Structures are given as structure tokens and as C-alpha cells.
Amino acid sequence: MREIFDATLTISPGLPTWPGDPKVVLERFSRIEDGADANISRMAIGVHTGTHVDAPYHFVEGAKTVEHLDLNLLTGHAQVVFVEVKGEDIEVSDLQQAGIPRGTDRLLLKTRNSGYWERIEDGFQQDFAALSPEAAQYLVDLGIQLVGIDYLSIAPFKEGKLTHQVLLRAGMVVIEGLDLRAVQPGRYELYCLPLKLAETDGAPARVILIRE
Amino acid sequence: MREIFDATLTISPGLPTWPGDPKVVLERFSRIEDGADANISRMAIGVHTGTHVDAPYHFVEGAKTVEHLDLNLLTGHAQVVFVEVKGEDIEVSDLQQAGIPRGTDRLLLKTRNSGYWERIEDGFQQDFAALSPEAAQYLVDLGIQLVGIDYLSIAPFKEGKLTHQVLLRAGMVVIEGLDLRAVQPGRYELYCLPLKLAETDGAPARVILIRE
């Protein structure tokens, strides 16, 4: 019997968003209780809201936009590891101790960040753990093709550009804002399906992990 | 070697939307070419835009909203059939001749509607083929738990309420706006992953079909 884990944050007006990004708007503009045939809603969000994917174009001019990401990369075997972060950022030494199996293509990093989703009402947190540029390069050198993390950026808050560039220039798919609270380290089948938005730098996604 | 078919429409400002629903807005509000660190976009759409899922709450007050749809239903074996529509709507007799295998849980209907996606620039089309209420009841009686179709509604344009109510009151998941142009009738693994929107009547989805 397969077990499905939903690694996706629920998008609601209370969800913390990146400073400068738009707040989540979910609005019902047609209501059965007001006599309409149907309940109908609209949404307005930044494309990097909640659980989402970064396309290379997010940080690399002229690079691939989100609707062209390879579905063969967005789906398949994935390894979830827990990373004990010794310092401020995730460094190469932290990754070396996380037990990443040889041959891993898709890697999801569970960290202390997962605790932030227990208190969403506290708003955006700056002190999340994220990859230093050197750690990002280490994953590129390992041959990782997709990396995910359990807060809203794969890169440190204070300096996000370099880490993103290292990953996205290598053609890596980046998933941010994963909810891995219920997911134990191990091997899963990943289905990361972002909205198919035309010529866009990223997209919100539904992400599930299946254990057979 | 598995083959993945993307049954999802690309969401762009040119995509036809239901009359009365908001037009698609995709807007880049931060640009590398203007000196920003990153390209960043926002989106504003109706939740029934493009390829999307209807939750029971869409037409049934107090019923399940989209974030609570069962992932075990949204993923799994699915049957794609071609339905030759004799009259205006899809009737029971059309479904009886479509060759729906016994035991089908998830059913995707490919019809003449698929041709509309060849000429998106012509805008919204009212004359799409959709299920009559009797045909909807026939699918409920067959035990179908998920039904999808290749235009923006499972129900006829002139009268949408009854067909939706028959399906949604039975707890069926409805996928609308599928792009099945490249998909031949047959059996697939379906992964229909809608955005996880809080307390909402539907959600845009990425839908893929895998043939092993």
C-alpha cells in the first residue's frame, strides 16, 4: 500500500511571504449564499509564494522559464535528508554529514526550518537555514539536479544572489517552501508539479512524496 | 522507459477564460534588466482558470473545499476515452459507445473540444461538448470517482448547475480544461495536483499522464 505525503504549504492570506512580495489574496466573488449558482474565487499571489519552484530565469537573464522545466526531472526518485546546521548557513561540512547517498539526483533538505511552519502566525522569519554558495557548488559537483528546502529560499536571507546563481546556472531545479514536517528522511517518489505559467521566473507547486 | 504527457494548458494572458471570470494577469514586478537581483512575477487569476479542479464546494454549500481533496483520488490509474458526441451534449448513449472499461475509477473524456486548443486566439467557445445531467448520473452510477474533460466546463454552457451538482454531490472530483491533444485513448497513471488553496471552490492544477 502506497503512502502519500503532502509536502505542500496551504496557501492562505496568513501565509508568510517574502519581504517585498505581494501578500496572498484569496477572494470569493460569487457566492451561493448570495443567490449565485456557484461559489467562485479568484487568487492573486507572487509566483514564489508558499511551496514553489524557481526557474533558472529567476536569477539568470535569458535562461529557461518555468513552463519549460523538464517533467522527467520534476518527478522521480528523491532522497530526503535531515541536515544538522552547525552555524548560520548550511555549509559543505553539514552536507557531508547529512548522509546523501551516492547517485542521488533529487535531494530534499529537512532542517530546523521545519519548526517555523508550526508558528506561521509569527510571520516571515529571516534566520532560516539555507545553502552557502560553497555548499550550493558542492551539490552541483555531486551531480544533484533538483534540490528542495523547507523554508522560503534555498539561499541565505542576507545574500541570496550568489547561491541562486550557482544552482540555477547549473540548470538545477530549486523547490522552496517545502513542508517536510511529517516526512522522515529516506527515499521517496517525488511528484513536484508547478503551475504551467507562461514565460515566468517561478511558479507555485503542489509537491507530494510517495512511499511504496 | 516511462513517457510523460503534460495534459495542462499553459496559463497566459491570452488563455480564454469563462465569461465573468477575471482575465489572466502575469506581471513581472522585478527585472534583472532594470538592475534588480532577480526576475520576480506575480499572478492574478480566477481559480477555475485553464486546467483546474472543481471542489464540491463550487456548487454545494458546506461541502468539501479544494485543499481537502483526497490525493489518493487525484493520483492513480486513469482511463482516457474518446467520446464521439452525436448531438449537442454528451448523452448516456455516447458514453455507452465510448468503451469505458469496467472498474474504471478515473475517467478522462477526450472530445471534439480538443480542437479548440488549436485556436486559442479565437477566445472562449460556448459550443463545447459537455455532460448532460443524465450522462453525469450515468457516470456516478458506474462508480466513477474522478472525471475530466477537454474544455473549461464538465457541464453545458447553457445550463451548468445541474450537471455539476450531480457530480459534486456524489463526491466526484472534476477536472476541467484538460489538454488531451497529444494523448491517445488508453490507460495511464494520472497525477492531478491542484494548488493547495485554503477554503476554496477550486484550484488551477498541473496534470500529467504517465505511460510505462
Image: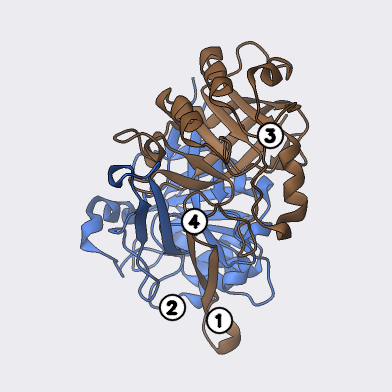
Chain colours: A brown, B blue
Image disc number at residue A21:
4
First of labels 3, 4 by sequence position: 4
Along the viewing direction, whichever of B186 and B199 lies nearer the viewer: B199
Along the viewing direction, whichever of A170 and B179 lies nearer the viewer: A170
Inter-mark Cα distance, 3 to 2: 40 Å
Along the viewing direction, whichever of A108 and B200 lies nearer the viewer: A108
Q: Amino acid at mark 4?
A: Asp
- Categorize mark 2 by other alpha carbons within 10 Å: few (<14), some (14-19), many (20+): few
The residue where tag 2 is placed is B159
The residue where tag 3 is placed is A210
Inter-mark Cα distance, 2 to 1: 18 Å
Instruction: Give the structural element (helix, strand or loop) at label 4.
Output: loop
| Rendering quarter of residue A80 | top right
The residue where tag 1 is placed is A31
Quick one: which residue is furthest to the bottom in this view? A35
- Categorize mark 1 by other alpha carbons within 10 Å: few (<14), some (14-19), many (20+): some
- Categorize mark 4 by other alpha carbons within 10 Å: few (<14), some (14-19), many (20+): some
Name the spot of residue A70 as percent of width and height, x first. 43, 31
Q: Nearer the viewer, mark 2 or mark 1?
A: 1
First of labels 1, 3 by sequence position: 1
Image check: B22 left or right of A124? left
Q: Nearer the viewer, mark 4 or mark 2?
A: 4
Instruction: Give the structural element (helix, strand or loop) at label 3.
Output: strand
Residue A146 versus residue A7 in the image, above or below = above
Q: Amino acid at mark 2?
A: Glu
Q: Chain of mark 3?
A: A
Inter-mark Cα distance, 1 to 4: 29 Å
Q: Nearer the viewer, mark 3 or mark 4?
A: 4
